[in-house]
Image (cartoon, grey):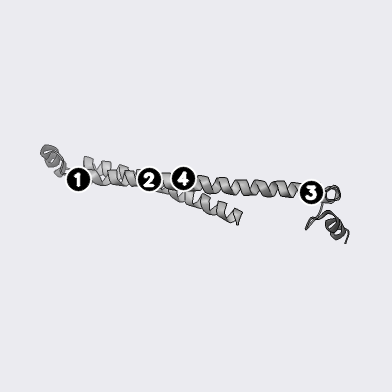
């Protein structure tokens, strides 16, 4: 009953616990407005950094994936091709380079997915 009276006189929606004294002086409402602005700024920062991480991670992942395919598509020099043909598939230099680039591409795409997550969290905070 008293809390409702304090809230009605101070203009705040809900006042409980230690905020009762601050509600009488009007500082609780100003703190809520200040924190609401902080949450809005935080959501903007999260969305922008998420979009940047998504775009950068996707572009670097694309470059790494393209680099993974190049050693497998071109013929290379004939002597090395003959030497590599006698080795097991996991010991061939082209395959090892391609696998290394695939791992790098997946790591960059993971960064891009984390950027999408950040943007989603920021958008959820804003709306």
Looking at the rendering, which quadrant does residue 103 occupy? top left
Separation (CA) of disc 1 from disc 4: 39 Å
Query: Which is more foreground, mark 3 or mark 1?
Result: 3
Q: How many C-alpha atoms fall within 10 Å of the one at disc 2: few (<14), some, or many (≥20)?
A: some
Residue underneath mark 3: 28
Q: Secondary structure at mark 1?
A: loop
Residue underneath mark 4: 53
Q: Secondary structure at mark 2?
A: helix
Residue underneath mark 2: 59
Q: Residue at x 73, y 49 (%)?
A: 32
Residue underneath mark 1: 88
Separation (CA) of disc 2 from disc 3: 46 Å
Q: Tell me which numbered mark, 1 or 4, is placed earlier along the sequence.
A: 4
Closest to the observer: 75 or 125?
125
Q: Looking at the image, do the residues carrying marks 1 and 4 touch, with CB atoms under 8 Å apart?
A: no
Query: Which is more foreground, mark 1 or mark 4?
Result: 4
Closest to the observer: 66 or 78?
66
Separation (CA) of disc 3 from disc 1: 72 Å
Q: Tell me which numbered mark, 3 or 1, is placed earlier along the sequence.
A: 3
Separation (CA) of disc 4 from disc 3: 37 Å
Q: How many C-alpha atoms fall within 10 Å of the one at disc 3: few (<14), some, or many (≥20)?
A: some
Q: Residue at x 14, y 41 (%)?
A: 81
Q: Is residue 97 shown above or below 10?
A: above
């Amino acid at each position: 009953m008293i809390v409702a009276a304090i809230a009605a006189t101070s203009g705040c929606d809900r006042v409980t616990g230690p905020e009762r004294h601050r509600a009488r002086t009007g500082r609780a409402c100003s703190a809520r407005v200040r924190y609401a602005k902080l949450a809005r700024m935080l959501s903007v920062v999260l969305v922008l950094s998420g979009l940047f991480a998504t775009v950068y991670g996707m572009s670097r992942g694309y470059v790494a994936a393209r680099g993974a395919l190049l050693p497998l598509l071109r013929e290379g020099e004939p002597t090395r091709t003959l030497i590599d043909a006698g080795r097991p598939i996991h010991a061939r230099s082209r395959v090892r380079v391609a696998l290394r680039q695939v791992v790098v591409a997946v790591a960059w795409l993971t960064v891009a997915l984390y950027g999408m997550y950040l943007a989603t969290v920021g958008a959820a905070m804003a709306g």
